[in-house]
Amino acid sequence: MKRGLAFAAIAGVALLGGAAFLIAGQAAVSPEAIQSSVTRTPELIDTAWKLPVAATFNADLQWQSNGSRCGPASVANTFRSIGEEETTEAEVLEGTGKCWTGFCIIGLTLDEVAEVARTKTGRKVSVLRNLTAEEFHEHMKRANDPGRRYIINFTREKIFGAGVGHFSPIGGYLEAQDMVFVLDVNERYKPWLIERERLFSAMDTIDSDGDQKRGLLLIE
């Protein structure tokens, strides 16, 4: 085998091995922690699904295909809710040069997910980073506006006690309960409600991949 081909083969194995390690790491949260760390009261979940934005998702999320593709899956689900044409991971990633191995090695940053979204829509896509708790609250108050869609980047560790960075769409805000409806695109977690302050704490963290704060993606 020629040296170039051998190197490519080794690099490919290394990439896939790294991706497998990443996915294994994302499974570190126990089922018990997933269940007990957030709110899933049936009555509240039913109410949340009736919120104006959540209703556009039709209680039917397309789960991320592997542990590294939560960002593209979040964009695809969000696009489906607003009537865009690209509504699968593959469609939103096509032509972006991202995740070409089938895995988003070490994941995508907030800016990279924004870049993917901008490539596929003519809508305004904004990165909201370094928000104060008060600014985050104001955005959550607007999360029920049918003309706006938010995708949040947060770390699971702050909520579930383990896990890594993650993306998911926000389905809306129950203002009376001060709880945010997170449409988790990972099938192990499924959608859940959480106190706004706890979600802000999980978002207000540094993404070690980009050395910047995590935050929100706003599509309008």
Image (cartoon, rainbow, N blue to C red):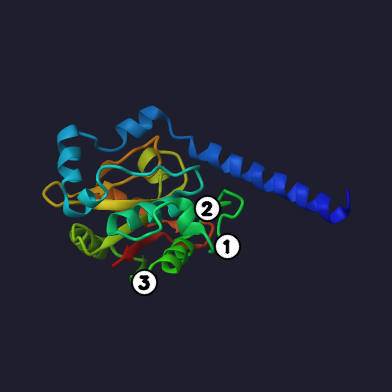
- Give the farthest residue toward the front: 85
Amino acid found under the numbered disc labelled 2: Gly
Point out which mark residue 97 bears.
1
- Give the farthest residue toward the right: 2
Residue 193 lies, with reference to residue 76, above or below; the image says above
Amino acid found under the numbered disc labelled 3: Gly
Report which residue position mark 2 lands on: 107
Instruction: Look at the numbered discs 1 and 3 and tell me whether their residues touch, using CB distance below 8 Å.
Output: no
Alpha-carbon distance for marks 2 and 1?
Answer: 14 Å
Q: Residues within 10 Å of mark 1 (few under 14, many from 20)?
A: few
Point out which mark residue 115 bears.
none
Where's the C terminus, which quadrant? bottom left
- Give the farthest residue toward the top: 32
Residue drawn at x 83%, y 49% is 6
Instruction: Look at the numbered discs 2 and 1 and tell me whether their residues touch, using CB distance below 8 Å.
Output: no
Q: Is residue 127 left or right of residue 177?
A: right
Q: Residues within 10 Å of mark 3 (few under 14, many from 20)?
A: few
Residue 67 lies, with reference to residue 201, above or below; the image says above
x then y, percent, for residue 106: 56, 51
Residue drawn at x 30%, y 41% is 191
Q: Quadrant of residue 114?
A: bottom left
Residue drawn at x 19%, y 33% is 42
x then y, percent, for residue 219: 32, 65
Report which residue position mark 3 lands on: 122
Q: Is residue 190 left or right of residue 2?
A: left
- Label 1 secondary element: loop
Residue 12 lies, with reference to residue 93, above or below; the image says above
Q: Foreground mark, 2 or 3?
A: 3
